[in-house]
Amino acid sequence: MEEVTIQFYVEGKTESPTKMVAKVREFTIVVDEPPELGGTNEGPNPVEYLLVALAGCLAITGYVVAKEKGIDISSIKVKAAGILDPRKFQGLDGERAGYKEIKVEILPEGNFTESELSEWIKEVEKRCPVSDNLKNPTPVEIKIKTKDQ
């Protein structure tokens, strides 16, 4: 089977130490911290966007899988919460900078059996790209460039 890939692209620039404005296709996304973390609260912070990405991906994948399996799902509500220890980010001794755990509740509405729902969620978890990136190591290459390069 031939490998098929799609590349997604984001570009952003800071407007303050806590605020970045990013372009994603034709969309402008504001990333900011709440006031208690020194920000101006003009947008979600990066770890909140991670939860949004996971929730959105699970919902979209949920509809794709439901359609393929002929399961009647009329709406999907997703709640995602993460526990984070900020010490590592703050330069202090801490276990890790990222979430220690993320818990998700998916509340589908529609006409389905428990058996269909059980099969559906297994497939959704297996196929959600954001969930896959969170559960499995993904190579991340970070390079630094200066204006001269």
Image (cartoon, rainbow, N blue to C red):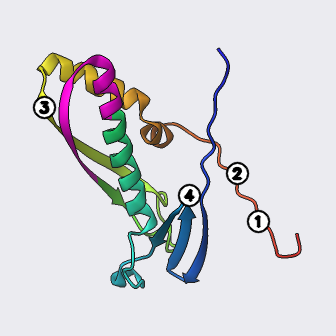
- State the separation of the CA atoms marked 1 and 3: 49 Å
Give the residue drawn at x 29%, y 18%. Answer: 69
Circle nearer the N terminus (2, 4): 4
Q: Earlier in the sequence, mark 4 or mark 3?
A: 4
Nearest to N terminus: mark 1 or mark 3? 3
The numbered mark at residue 25 is 4
Give the number of the mark in front: 1 or 3: 3
Left/right placement of residue 36 relative to residue 9 reads: left
Magenta residue check for 76 = yes
Identify which residue, 82 or 89, lies in the foreground: 82
According to the picture, the residue beneath numbered tag 2 turns out to be 141
Question: Which marked residue is nearer to the observer: mark 2 or mark 4?
Answer: 4
* Magenta stretch, residue numbers: 62-80
Three-letter amino acid code of the residue under disc 3:
Gly
Residue 58 position in % (x across, y down):
34, 40
Q: Is residue 140 left or right of residue 84?
A: right
- Residue at mark 3: 110
Q: Tell me the kind of residue under disc 2.
A: Glu
